[in-house]
């Protein structure tokens, strides 16, 4: 990500109002993954909330919920938020956020390395080539835990070879199981951009090992915009080294989206 318009001056931020920013985590994660981003967004003058998708409270046992259940979790959380609301979804949380906004309204939507607009079948095929044994174990047990069972796997899937080992270790300890049903639904349940009537920002990770830059650009084009690429980052944009720039980009874009959505016509903000 280049430094230019990722941040605004203090004066510009004071001139534009903050928003309520609702952060939706992705597969295997929980609200903990937003801690530093949430703190920075709050310091910049936003009212920041996080969603804990059901089954992601760290309790043992198989998670049996589907994407529609997670959408209800976001809807419940959004009901308690004051407008203007900007929803931010990462990975699977990006799919959930898109499905939520197919029927509900907000001032804006930010997608961080989201489930692609045409589903995850190509991504699953790539995952199967790299981790065939783990995919078989996941299918046999109907659990997604096999994909996050070692530190090297966590680094490979969520980070980069240059990510600090301490961050990889901390993430490894915190990651939990994920719903196999939700995993299958990412293949079959596609977003419907034509039903999302809010400005959209798509942020891609240059070194994402789940989704390709081409998939992220295709997703952005479906919303009439272009993806912002964070150079040197792995899939976990909110945790990897570039997270402060990601937070600033969200804040900067959200203020513009709030201003646009309050105008007579609305529309996407580039």
Image: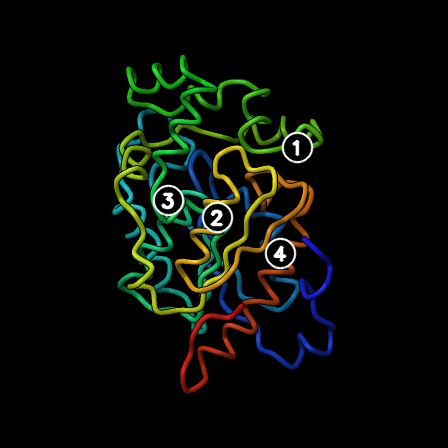
- Are the two marked residues, 4 and 2, in contact with CB atoms closer than 8 angstroms? no
Quarter that holds the C terminus: bottom right
Asked if the residue under mark 4 is in contact with the one under mark 1, i.e. CB atoms within 8 Å, the reply is no
| Vertical side of 15 occupied by 253: above or below | above
Q: CA distance from mark 4 to mark 2?
A: 19 Å
Helix, strand or loop for disc 4: helix
> Mark 3 or mark 2: which comes first in sequence?
3
Rendered view: 139 above or below 214: above
Q: How far is the residue under mark 4 from the one under mark 3?
A: 21 Å
For marks 4 and 3, the one nearer the N-term is: 3
Q: Is residue 88 left or right of residue 78?
A: right
In the picture, measured across the screen, residue 203 lies left or right of residue 186, that is right
Residue at label 1? 167
Residue 153 circle label: none
Q: Which residue is mark 4?
A: 247
Q: Which residue corresponds to the image point at 55% horizontal and 26% vertical from the top-left?
A: 154
């Amino acid at each position: 990500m280049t430094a230019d318009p990722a941040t605004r001056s203090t004066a510009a931020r004071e001139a534009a109002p903050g928003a309520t920013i609702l952060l939706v985590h992705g597969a295997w994660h929980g609200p903990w993954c937003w801690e530093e981003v949430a703190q920075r967004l709050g310091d910049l003058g936003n009212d920041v909330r996080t969603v804990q998708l059901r089954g992601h409270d760290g309790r043992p046992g198989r998670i049996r919920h589907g994407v529609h259940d997670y959408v209800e979790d976001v809807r419940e959380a959004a009901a308690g938020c004051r407008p203007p609301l900007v929803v931010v979804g990462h990975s699977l949380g990006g799919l959930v956020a898109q499905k939520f906004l197919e029927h509900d309204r907000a001032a804006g939507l930010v997608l961080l390395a989201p489930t692609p607009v045409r589903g995850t079948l190509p991504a699953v095929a790539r995952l199967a080539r790299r981790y065939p044994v783990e995919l078989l174990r996941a299918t046999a047990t109907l659990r997604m835990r096999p994909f996050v069972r070692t530190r090297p796997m966590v680094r490979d899937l969520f980070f980069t070879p240059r990510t600090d080992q301490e961050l990889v270790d901390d993430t490894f300890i915190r990651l939990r199981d994920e719903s196999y049903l939700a995993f299958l639904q990412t293949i079959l349940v596609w977003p419907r951009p034509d039903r999302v009537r809010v400005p959209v920002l798509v942020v891609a990770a240059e070194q994402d090992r789940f989704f390709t830059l081409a998939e992220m650009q295709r997703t952005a084009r479906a919303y009439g915009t272009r993806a912002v690429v964070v150079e040197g980052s792995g899939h976990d944009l909110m945790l990897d080294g570039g997270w402060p720039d990601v937070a600033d980009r969200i804040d900067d874009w959200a203020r513009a989206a709030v201003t646009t959505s309050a105008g007579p016509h609305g529309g996407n903000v580039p």
